[in-house]
């Protein structure tokens, strides 16, 4: 039975307002992009980078960010405007990470079920500040951050560190994240079951073979209740 669930952070427990910022930036340069179009393009650009530019986004370099903006424009058929779009975004305030509406209730419900909750995330030293501001920190029994331990998913070392800190066996654990190549591949290296979060079914991850795909992290509560996770 599952005694410990580890979560990714970005786009799993917290999200930002990038799609709305994209919509605003396009409006400023003369393009009418709907919020749903911006959300879809942001999602697909993320999945493209997860697949073909693994680890690039964690570098946070100007060139990578520009490439990402160009990718967004490609999915919106506005590639000719990508430089103006990118420059407009630079004028705006940095995005803020906020927990999903369901995050705190989900963590509380899992803990009430006797399932401990932790974090394994590729993030910089701002991770704990994000957790604290969103009232997530106190709800986790284990926090493993890539920049703190010197290993990034899918390196098995970051998963092994979490297992070491909790004293749990992999078959007593479950992992939830949105990146197949970091989260699913990495968790399998330590034989830890995993669910992948993906917006709108298989959109953007048509190439992957993952036994459990969910649209948002809170669905893991029902997975636990319905005993879909093998012992």
Image (cartoon, helix red, strand yellow):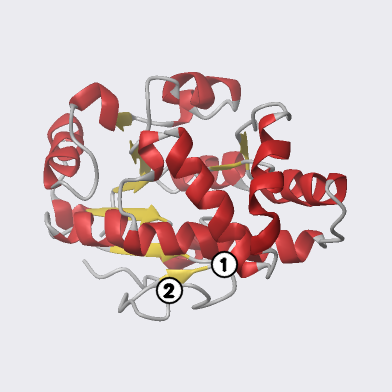
Q: Is residue 89 above or below residue 215?
A: above
> Quadrant where the N terminus lies?
bottom left
Q: Is residue 22 above or below residue 89?
A: below
Question: Secondary structure beneath disc 1?
Answer: loop
Give the x, y percent position of residue 80.
67, 61
Report whether residue 101 is seen. no
Residue at x 44% of width, y 49% of height: 113
Can you identify the residue that label 1 sits on?
199
Give the x, y percent position of residue 92.
73, 30
Residue at x 71% of width, y 45% of height: 84
Q: Is residue 140 above or below residue 73?
A: above
Q: Earlier in the sequence, mark 1 or mark 2?
A: 1
Give the x, y percent position of residue 115.
37, 46
Q: Find residue 148 and name its label.
A: none
Left or right, 120 with reference to 48: left
Q: Find residue 205 and name its label.
A: 2
Question: Secondary structure beneath disc 2?
Answer: loop
Residue at x 59% of width, y 73% of height: 200
Left or right, 144 with reference to 37: left
Q: Is residue 31 above or below residue 65?
A: below
Q: Are marks 1 and 2 in contact (CB under 8 Å)?
A: no
- Tell me which corner region of the image, top left, top right, bottom left or bottom right, holds residue 63: top left
Report whether residue 164 is seen. yes
Give the x, y percent position of residue 153.
24, 46
**Of the residues tagged 1 and 2, which is closer to the observer?**
2
Give the Cα separation between the discs numbered 1 and 2: 10 Å
């Amino acid at each position: 039975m599952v005694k410990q669930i580890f979560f990714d952070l970005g786009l799993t427990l917290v999200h930002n307002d990038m799609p709305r910022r994209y919509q605003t930036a396009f409006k400023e340069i003369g393009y009418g992009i709907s919020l749903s179009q911006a959300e879809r393009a942001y999602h697909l650009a993320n999945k493209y980078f997860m697949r073909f530019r693994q680890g690039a986004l964690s570098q946070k370099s100007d060139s990578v960010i520009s490439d990402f903006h160009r990718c967004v424009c490609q999915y919106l058929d506005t590639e000719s405007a990508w430089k103006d779009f990118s420059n407009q975004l630079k004028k705006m305030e940095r995005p803020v990470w906020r927990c999903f509406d369901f995050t705190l209730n989900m963590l509380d419900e899992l803990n009430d079920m006797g399932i401990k909750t932790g974090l394994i995330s590729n993030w910089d030293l701002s991770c704990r500040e994000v957790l604290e501001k969103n009232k997530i920190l106190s709800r986790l029994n284990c926090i493993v951050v890539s920049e703190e331990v010197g290993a990034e998913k899918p390196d098995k070392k970051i998963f092994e560190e979490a297992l070491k800190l909790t004293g749990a066996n992999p078959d007593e654990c479950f992992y939830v994240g949105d990146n197949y190549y970091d989260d699913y591949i990495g968790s399998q290296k330590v034989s830890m079951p995993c669910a992948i979060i993906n917006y709108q079914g298989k959109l953007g991850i048509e190439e992957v073979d993952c036994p459990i795909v969910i649209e948002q992290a809170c669905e893991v509560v029902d997975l636990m209740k319905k005993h879909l996770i093998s012992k």
